[in-house]
Image (tube, rainbow, N blue to C red):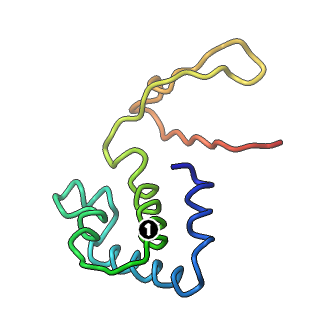
Amino acid sequence: MLKSQRDSLVSSLSGDDRQNMRRIIAAIKEARGDSPDLAEAQGRKTAREILAGWQLDLPVEVRSALEATLVRDETGPRVGELPADFNLKRLGSEERVRLSTFRGRKPVALAFGSYT
């Protein structure tokens, strides 16, 4: 699901439903403890597993928005997981740089955005 679709689901909720969803997410975070990556690494339950164990009578819209938020939170690299290797062209040059050449040397930060 795209971010815009998730945002649309959340913004279509009533104020009470949105607040209820936030309370559920806060309760999941408290029950899970630490970060999702650390919880998974230590064999603790994921947010989805915690939610599945609760017998919540939620409206379909709230459940959909909550599921979309959990999917978003579980997407991406995990602690200790190596990123996919790729190369990029240096700005103003034809030289290419490969991410893996920085492994073990220094931290690398990648920033993606639109400047149009």
Where residue 19 sits in the image (x, y, percent)?
51, 84
**Residue under numbered circle 1:** 66
Instruction: Name the amino acid type tagged 1.
Output: Leu
Which residue is at 25% across, 68% downward?
52
Q: Residue furthest top?
A: 94
Query: Relative to residue 25, is residue 92 drawn left or right?
Result: right
Q: Is residue 83 above or below residue 55?
A: above
Helix, strand or loop at label 1? It is helix
Which residue is at 42% across, 49% downward?
75
Q: Is residue 15 above or below residue 75?
A: below
Query: Relative to residue 111, is residue 22 drawn left or right?
Result: left
Q: Residue furthest bottom?
A: 16
Q: Residue furthest left?
A: 43
Q: Quadrant of the C terminus?
A: top right
Closer-to-camera residue (23/98): 23
> For the image shown, how many numbered marks are present on the structure?
1
Where residue 44 sits in the image (x, y, percent)?
19, 63
Q: How crowded is the residue under tag 1: few (<14 C-alpha within 10 Å), some, or many (20+)?
A: many
